[in-house]
Structure formats: C-alpha cells, structure tokens
Amino acid sequence: MSTSEWIGRKVAGWLPAGKTPAGKPTASPQEGRPETRTAKPAAAKEGQIRSSRERLNATLRQKEEALSPRVLRRTLTELQAIVDPSVSEVEGGKRARGVAQWYSKATPEQRQDCWLLMSEQFAPDASKVKAAREQYEAAVGSPDEGVAEIRLRKALVSPRTRLLQRFAVFPEGMRFLVDLRQALMPALKSNKRLLALEAELENLFTTWFDVAFLELRRISWDSPASLVEKLIKYEAVHDIKSWGDVKNRLDSDRRCYGFFHPSLPDEPLIFVEVAFMHEIAANISPLLDESAEAVDLSKATTAIFYSISNTQPGLKGVSFGDSLIKRVVETLRADFPKLKTFATLSPIPGFRGWLQKNAGRMLDATPEKMRAQLSRAVSFEPAGAEHVLSALESMPTLPEKSVLRQWLHGCAAHYLGKELSQERPIDPVARFHLGNGARVEQINWAADMSGKGVKQSYGLMVNYLYDLRKIDRHRQALAQGRVPVSDAVSDLYF
C-alpha cells in the first residue's frame, strides 16, 4: 500500500458519515440505500461489543459496527419520531413505514444495529419503575393497593411497545414485524441485548394473533392458485411432489383447513390436512396415493389428521394449533354426523436420534430373556448398543415376529410415553398432541418408508387419538407427569 493510499483511508475513517475524502456526499440508509462503508459481521465476544448507548455517545465507529455513530443517532431520531406523542396514529404509521422501507434495503449488519436501538433505547424508565414498585409494595394490603398496582403496570409498559404498535399500523406492517422476528431469533444466542425486543414481539403477537381474531377457512382445489402454491411451499410433514399430489390432498374426499389473520389475509398461519376413512390409518402411503379411489363421505366414520404445518417461523411460541384442531373437529362433526373417530397419523421426528444416544440405557432396561434373544439375532453375546443399532439398519426386511422389531416398538413406546422433560414429552409432535388432550393410541411399523421417515424414526409412525369425552382428563394426567396411552401401547413397555 502506498503512502497516499494509507493517508486516504485514514482520512476517510475520520470524516463524518455521508462524506468522502473529496467532500462528496454518499447515500445514507435513511435515503433508501445502505451506507457505502459496511462492516463485516461482528467477530468479537459479546462483552467486547459496545452497547448502543456507548456508540451513540461516540464519534467514530469500530470496525465491527455497521452504522457510524452519526447515522446511528439519525436512525434513533427517526425511530423516536414514530412514537412522538404529538403525532397521530396514522402519521406514526407513515413514519414507521419509511423506516421499514430503509430496513428492507439495509444489510444484515445494519439491520442488527436497528434491532439494538429498538431493544436498548426504548426500554421502560428505570426510575419510574423503581418508584412505582416501592409505592406498590408499601400499599399492599391497604385501600390504595389497586391504584398502586395500576401505576406499576403503566410504569412497566415500555416505549418499545408503542413503537412496535406503530409499525403494525401500515398495511404491510404486520408482515414486516413477523419477518423481523424471524430474522432476529437466530441472533439471540450471540447477543443477549436483543432479548427484550424479541420478548416484546412475542408478547404482542400472542395478543394480535389470539384465536378470537383468526378465521378458519377451507382450502380446496378451487382456491386461488397463489394460495395452493403456499401449501406446497409450507408443507412441513410430507413434501408435496407435484400438482397431482396437491390435487389429491385437496380432492372431494379430503379436507384442508387453515387459520388466517386479517393483517395477513393471503397467508395461512397454520393448516391441517384431513383424510376420511373407515378405520384409523396405519400407513401414510395410501393417504398419499394419487391413484387411490375416493372414499364415500356418506359412509366414512374416521377423520385422520395426517399433516399439520406451521407456516410462519416469526410466530414461534404463539400457540394456535390446539384451537385449529378443535375448530376443525367441530366443523367436521357438523358437516359429517357419522364421523365418530378423530385421530392423527403422525411422525416421530426425534425418535431415531434419541435411540442412538440411549440404546445402551434401553438395553439395560430390557428383560433378560429378550436381551438373550437380541444377542442371538445380532450374532453377538452379549448384544451391545452398537450391534443392535447396526442390525436395525435392515428394519424394512425384519419379519413380524422378529425380536429386533419387538424391541424397537418397545423403545418407541418408552420414548413417547415415559421420556419427559419438565413433565412434558421430549418429542415435539407428541408434546403438541398430548398437550392438546390426545392420547398415544397405536405405534405403526414401516408406516413411512420415505427417506425422511426412516431417518427420523426407522419408518415408525404413531396415531394420537382425540377422544372428545376424555380430553380434559388426559390433559390433567399429563400435568401430573403421566402420559395417557392406550393398553396396546402400554403393553409394549419393557
């Protein structure tokens, strides 16, 4: 590097943001384009990263910081203008939209600087919170307790809440906030300063996306093509492979329902696919078979929920799946009075990974007679975890009475019915259905032999039964740490 180049770079670093060494202005993020000078993602540890307060009071930026102190201050001013109490809701929404337009063109590093401002600079007033808390503690038990509680509640409401509410005003605002949280969540592990903003968003979404504000809509082959395309995009359980596949799932003997929000009218938040049958399904292949004959709806007695997909990662933690199932069951019972059985055919996504880590423990719990049979089956005495797991790789060819098949069934029953964390099933799908009042009804062998099914659970699938008369009883049992299972499943325990 020549001396002139070195001096030029140094001078450029000293100049205020928006100027070049020749004195020519450059576009700022607020003018619709990212700063000319961007930074690489921060590589320093969190303790070495300056807070937004420190950066706002500084003159120069450090190399890991995307926005200079000057632009950071300007961005903060624009965010503060959004919550200016002297402007109307409509005007605040217009200002929020302007910031959102800049944000859409900003780099990931610049967006993270924006998150930091929203998280750190719009917190509750600590002095007001302290004073209100002291007043409340002094008033407990007195006639003034209610008034003191109201003051404390008001003090705890942060300007951040008002800021986010203003972003929700303009038509695309809800989409903006949901996408913002989706992008924000992966950064939480490396930057705890963002936790407050993420928690605020989740709290607001819990209210905004309450089931009372959601519309249950049937999605059919006659729905707009753009909506059908979203089903293909968001299907998370059994991939949709073609238009023929999706047409089969939306055929006359099927039903698909989704929850929709007024602010995201063309986006299903969650959807469920339903097949009508005469008995509980034990294999996914017939349900996905495009050439299968349609079921006579007038004679169907069983509704099988075979796929439930959430579509918005930014709404993680906002629960509306249980309400969806209840609403769908109510709708189906009204439309088809002969339906008596409501069950799922569900994957067991965490089973194989869990067994590979816990096969030794399960072998220790295996009765001596079965363990001896396992040793003979794998031709190794005594059978170790590695021998059994290796033998299970040939599971598609195992005969019905194979001891390896029996052992795998027992492990699956244990995984679903006894492996708990904080009194909740460790399998995410089991946690969802059992938390909604279902019970583990039946474990099915070779029910999903797709690559995904074998990778997740050796091809096993499970039926969760929704017995409408026992849902509350099942929930109560789960709250006490007891997973409700059928006799057929409990008989599989070692």
Image: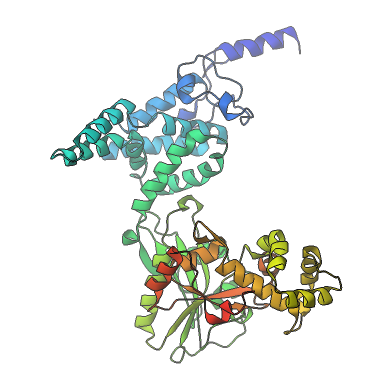
Q: At 48% from the left edge and 50% from the top edge, which residue is drawn?
A: 314
Q: Position of residue 427 (x, y in %)?
A: 57, 62
**Image quarter of the C terminus:** bottom right
Of 249 and 470, the residue lying toward us:
470
Of 447 and 7, the residue lying toward us:
447
Q: Position of residue 263 (x, y in %)?
A: 37, 54
| Outermost residue, front side | 368
Q: Is residue 353 left or right of residue 151?
A: right
Tell me: residue 37, above or below residue 170. Answer: above
Q: Is residue 193 left or right of residue 449?
A: left
Confirm whether residue 248 shows in the render: yes
Q: How many marks?
A: 0
Q: Position of residue 275 (x, y in %)?
A: 51, 80
Q: Is residue 92 left or right of residue 413?
A: left
Q: At 43% from the left edge and 30% from the top edge, which residue is drawn?
A: 120
| Outermost residue, bottom side | 299
Q: Position of residue 65 (x, y in %)?
A: 56, 25
**Quarter of the figure with residue 191:** top right
Tell me: residue 165, above or below residue 395. Answer: above
**Image quarter of the N terminus:** top right
Colouring style = rainbow
**Quarter of the figure with residue 122:** top left
Confirm whether residue 238 shows in the render: no
Q: Is residue 297 left or right of residue 358?
A: left
Of 494 and 152, the residue lying toward us:
494
Q: At 82% from the left edge and 69% from the top edge, which residue is drawn?
A: 382
Tell me: residue 169, above or below residue 294. Answer: above
| Outermost residue, left side | 143
